[in-house]
């Protein structure tokens, strides 16, 4: 959250009758580039990789998939496993056992080009608990948006640079739009108790909420995205992922019982 | 220094046959020093002088009887007959011209300084003269008026940040009574920190920057506060929709010392208190300024000044969010007239800018604090060697303390806060303005600047990916990295005839402090960083050539100035850089070069019922970085090819003045996506060229009416009505991209426009 942007928005709201309208912008059509998404989850899961191509910005069609690639995963013992093409851009290793703190290398060969990514699965950080508190958001009150702010409590591991993403399912719908992304790191909080307020989503009483804490490897963004030549100066909410490693699933039903998998009807004020 | 003494002795010898007439030039009504007032000797055409920043002048002429003509724009010309046979002190008080149409037409001094002076690329504003220029919210603002002049561009809609000749916002040295102001904006840029009621003189140097100034690459905005009325007590002020202001000034001892106190505060937050909603009710949203100044004449040769500025913005929402920032500056000055030719000014200057952010709740919150603080000791001399040579020389030493980011609060590891950084910056300079002949005048100067980045601290080096390669600790006072360099300044004027001249200048400026900002204009969270082992000083070389011509007995002033600048060691961000609260922010930077060039056309009607100007700038500002845009040159964000401003003020009757300004500029260079991809079911923009797109062209008309009420001996007042963006154009403040609400697979561009038809009304008074 950038406080400057928040306050700018506030000022506009209070003072200025700003106008918004949809306009036509003539954007260039960039040369299509490969997009490789390879989330890896802790434990035994299917490891899947999807390869697509970038599209023109305003295109509404699904991206072109790439099915002629060779995708190879090297495990910590340098054993190479070639993923099996599944069609529609998907490649898979069934029942792959991913181990925390182990390093993996992904190689992709396609159309005479090769891409390589190295990543170490981050330290497992569990969610300690969830709480809520009354909050009206930054701006004028809007009952339709809700009044309950969710806080995720966790204990950060000492000496490890951690990046977290909170993935929320609200009333059985994953909040997976760009504006719902909530990503933070342990800067100035290394090894401490972190009580992260999730300002990106405000809830109403009675909402069911499922929270997952995902760990990110920041170096993923610099290896597999090397074909991205230029980004704007301003930080943008680009999710820093191509290898996504789920290091922790919330298991707090002992705290927020009796809802399985933390699908909690609000209010859940325990601890607040 | 030996060279300097030799030069001084030489001038003394050469000038031994002349006598000196010196003194001060002040305004008759309030005793304010008049800066850059001129003195001419009627009988000797090339003999003349100009008062310095403290109203002091000195002129050397041979024995004889002469007529001296003292004049200053907006004041009655004064002729003094004098018989010179010894060094003489003559203090002058000029009478301001009363503001009636008749007087303005008949008596106004029509200055030809545009043509006769050596300086070029200089804009001088009289804060009184801008009262009727319509501006946003009716708040007269020197910076927004400067943005209507050639070569100066607004950083955005309603913003007080500005770009000068293709340079960045941080390349402007903004001085208030010699103290640097690090963030000259209020309310996120919509107001400047300068309360015009407290100001006496505003000068912007776009090029031909005098050698006494250093530290910024593109421009110097030198703002001087009023000294205060040393004749009588007065109060003045204004009541507006957004803010009100009050100024009180008067003598400490009549004709010997005076003071001025000027304050301004916005009051939008008072309206929020009327809200029934508790959040709005507890919101804080205001800023204030307080300007203070006092001066006292200790003896005929000594005068001391004490001035200060305190300003702060306070924003917040209940107890969950707080954000405040502000500047504090103070200056202690001692003027000493060493002899009739040598004037000394010693200044001790303090400046501090800080911001703090609080996020959280009563029981759980954290704060971020950041600041930059300076102590500066400055010694300047003005030597009026003879009527053909005016020499300035001096030295200054400044200590900087940078507090990048300090964290505190619950759940915060304060040890991770960024450590303070320290630096010493100094400069020594010598400059002479020399009249070679009746037609040729040259000004040449040299400044040597030095920057010492000091410990205690840790110096890191990084690889191309931003990974730390080496780390070295430095102890207290130990030099981590030192830079220095010569900064030559040169300008020349050739007088073609009485009405026209050509001028040329060359400047080299070095800048050791750099701003890291994640917004296109100045923002409160901008971080100032010193040059270091990673960040080299910015170096700008500028050459300029200009033609100056006056018409109709100096009623019209025309100039055409062209310039070309090279910019070395420019800073930009790596692709996808994160600078906010980043301890390794230097690893996120790229270094490159730039060039800027342009032509500035300016036609100014100085007198008559209709006054105003037309300004047109045709310019480019380009950057080249090896790792940005695949090494290809790209436009800087301040690159706007066309920039036009038309400003007009018309005396409709003796009591009513109408005014209007119209501006047009090419849209700013921006980066838009040229493609997209899907990751984790989210559409992510794919960027290619940096600043490869343009915002839509910007244009706007502002209109205003000032109604002057009947003036009496004791009281005067006026009403000002204005409308910003009178034809309600929806100028793009930002363009963002979002999913269509009805069809999420479709992405659309959304333009946000801030201000349409912003009316304002202000009541101004003086008694």
Image (spheres, helix red, strand yellow):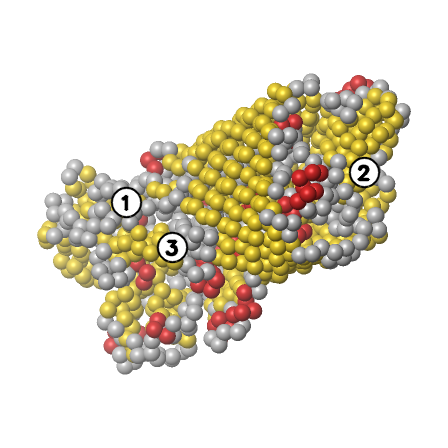
Q: Residue at x 64, y 56 (%)?
A: B718
> Gap in Å between the C-alphas at discs 2 and 1?
64 Å
Q: CA distance from mark 3 to mark 2?
A: 55 Å
Of marks 3 and 2, which one's residue comes earlier in the chain? 2
Q: Residue at x 50, y 32 (%)?
A: B600
Residue behind mark 1: A26
Q: Position of residue B371 (x, y in %)?
A: 57, 53
Residue A6 to residue B110: above or below: below
Chain bearing mark 1: A
Residue B643: give x, y in percent of width and height.
46, 39
Q: Which residue is mark 3?
A: B752
The disc label shown at residue B92, or none: 2
| C-alpha gap between disc 3 and disc 1 | 17 Å
Image marks 3 and 2: residues in contact by CB distance under 8 Å: no
Q: Locate residue B736 relative to residue B191 in the image: left or right.
A: left
Outermost residue on the bottom side: it is A258
CB under 8 Å between discs 2 and 1: no
Q: Is residue B57 left or right of residue B480?
A: right
Nearest to the observer: residue B558 or residue B572: B558
């Amino acid at each position: 959250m950038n406080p400057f942007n928040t306050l700018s928005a506030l000022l506009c709201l209070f003072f200025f009758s700003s106008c918004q309208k949809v306009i036509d912008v003539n954007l260039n059509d960039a040369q299509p580039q490969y997009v490789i998404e390879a989330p890896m989850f802790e434990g035994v899961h299917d490891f899947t990789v999807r390869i697509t191509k970038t599209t023109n910005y305003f295109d509404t069609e699904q991206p072109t998939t790439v099915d002629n690639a060779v995708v190879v995963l090297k495990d910590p013992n340098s054993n190479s496993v070639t993923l099996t093409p599944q069609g529609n851009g998907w490649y898979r290793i069934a029942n792959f056992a991913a181990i925390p703190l182990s390093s993996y290398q992904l190689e992709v060969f396609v159309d005479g080009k090769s891409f390589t990514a190295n990543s170490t699965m981050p330290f497992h950080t569990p969610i300690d608990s969830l709480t809520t508190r009354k909050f009206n958001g930054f701006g004028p009150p809007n009952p339709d948006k809700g009044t309950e702010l969710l806080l995720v409590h966790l204990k950060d591991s000492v000496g490890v640079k951690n990046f977290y993403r909170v993935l929320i399912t609200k009333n059985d719908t994953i909040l997976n739009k760009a504006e719902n992304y909530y990503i933070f790191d342990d800067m100035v909080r290394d090894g401490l108790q972190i009580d992260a307020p999730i300002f990106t989503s405000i809830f109403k009483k009675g909402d069911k909420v499922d929270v997952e804490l995902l760990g990110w490897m920041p170096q993923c963004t610099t290896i597999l995205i090397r074909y991205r030549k230029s980004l704007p100066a301003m930080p943008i909410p680009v999710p820093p992922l191509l290898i996504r490693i789920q290091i922790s699933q919330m298991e707090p039903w002992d705290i927020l019982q009796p809802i399985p998998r933390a699908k909690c009807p609000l209010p859940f004020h325990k601890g607040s | 220094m030996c060279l300097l003494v030799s030069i001084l002795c030489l001038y003394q010898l050469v000038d031994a046959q002349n006598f000196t007439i010196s003194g001060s030039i002040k305004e008759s009504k309030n005793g304010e020093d008049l800066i850059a007032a001129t003195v001419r000797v009627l009988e000797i055409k090339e003999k003349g002088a100009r008062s310095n920043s403290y109203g002091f002048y000195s002129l050397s002429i041979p024995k004889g009887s002469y007529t001296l003509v003292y004049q200053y724009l907006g004041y009655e010309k004064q002729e003094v007959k004098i018989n010179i046979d010894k060094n003489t002190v003559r203090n002058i008080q000029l009478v301001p011209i009363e503001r009636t149409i008749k007087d303005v037409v008949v008596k106004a001094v029509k200055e030809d300084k545009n043509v006769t002076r050596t300086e070029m690329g200089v804009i001088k504003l009289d804060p009184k003269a801008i009262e009727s220029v319509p501006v946003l919210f009716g708040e007269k603002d020197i910076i927004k008026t400067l943005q209507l002049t050639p070569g100066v561009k607004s950083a955005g809609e309603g913003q007080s940040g500005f770009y000068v000749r293709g340079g960045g916002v941080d390349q402007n040295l903004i001085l208030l009574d010699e103290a640097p102001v690090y963030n000259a904006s209020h309310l996120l840029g919509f107001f400047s920190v300068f309360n015009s009621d407290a100001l006496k003189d505003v000068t912007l140097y776009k090029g031909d920057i005098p050698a006494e100034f250093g530290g910024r690459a593109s421009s110097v905005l030198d703002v001087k506060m009023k000294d205060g009325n040393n004749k009588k007590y007065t109060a003045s002020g204004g009541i507006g929709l957004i803010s009100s202001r009050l100024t009180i000034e008067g003598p400490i001892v009549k004709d010997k010392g005076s003071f001025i106190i000027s304050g301004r505060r916005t009051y939008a937050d008072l309206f929020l208190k009327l809200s029934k909603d508790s959040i709005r009710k507890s919101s804080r949203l205001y800023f204030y300024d307080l300007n203070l100044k006092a001066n006292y004449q200790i003896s005929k040769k000594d005068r001391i000044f004490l001035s200060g500025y305190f300003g702060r913005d306070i924003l917040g929402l209940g107890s969950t969010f707080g954000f405040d920032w502000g500047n504090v500056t103070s200056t202690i000055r001692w003027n000493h007239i060493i002899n009739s030719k040598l004037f000394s000014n010693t200044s001790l200057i303090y400046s501090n800018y800080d911001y703090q952010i609080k996020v959280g709740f009563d029981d759980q919150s954290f704060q971020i604090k950041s600041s930059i603080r300076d102590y500066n000791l400055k010694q300047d001399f003005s030597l009026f060697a003879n009527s053909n040579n005016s020499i300035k020389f001096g030295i200054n030493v400044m200590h900087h303390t940078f507090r990048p980011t300090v964290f505190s609060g619950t759940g915060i590891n304060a040890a991770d806060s960024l450590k303070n950084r320290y630096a010493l910056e100094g400069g020594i300079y010598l400059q002479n303005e020399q009249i070679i002949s009746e037609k040729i005048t040259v000004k040449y100067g040299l400044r040597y600047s030095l920057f010492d980045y000091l410990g205690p601290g840790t110096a890191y080096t990084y690889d191309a990916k931003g990974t730390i390669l080496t780390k070295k600790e430095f102890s207290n006072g130990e030099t981590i990295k030192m830079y220095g360099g010569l900064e030559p300044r040169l300008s020349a004027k050739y007088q073609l005839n009485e009405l026209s001249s050509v001028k040329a200048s060359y400047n080299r400026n070095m800048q050791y402090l750099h701003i890291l900002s994640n917004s296109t204009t100045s923002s409160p969270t901008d971080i100032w960083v010193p040059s270091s082992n990673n960040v080299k000083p910015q170096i700008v070389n500028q050459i300029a050539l200009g033609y100056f011509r006056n018409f109709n007995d100096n009623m019209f002033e025309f100039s055409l100035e062209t310039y070309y600048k090279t910019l070395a060691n420019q800073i930009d961000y790596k692709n996808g850089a994160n600078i906010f609260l980043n301890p390794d922010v230097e690893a996120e930077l790229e270094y490159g070069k730039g060039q800027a060039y342009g032509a500035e056309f300016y036609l100014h009607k100085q007198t008559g019922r209709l006054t105003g100007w037309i300004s047109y700038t045709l310019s480019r500002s380009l950057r080249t970085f090896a790792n940005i845009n695949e090494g290809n040159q790209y436009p800087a964000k301040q690159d706007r090819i066309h920039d036009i401003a038309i400003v007009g003020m018309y005396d409709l009757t003796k009591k009513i003045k109408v005014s209007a300004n119209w501006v047009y500029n090419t849209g700013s260079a921006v980066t838009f996506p040229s493609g997209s991809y899907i990751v984790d079911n989210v559409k992510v923009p794919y960027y290619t060229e940096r600043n490869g797109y343009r915002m839509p062209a910007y244009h706007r008309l502002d209109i205003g009416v000032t109604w002057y009420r009947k003036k009496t001996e004791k009281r005067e007042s006026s009403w000002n009505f204005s409308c910003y963006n009178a034809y309600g154009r929806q100028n793009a403040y930002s363009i963002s991209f979002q999913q269509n609400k009805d069809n999420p697979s479709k992405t659309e561009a959304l333009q946000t426009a801030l201000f349409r038809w912003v009316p304002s009304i202000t009541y101004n008074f003086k008694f």
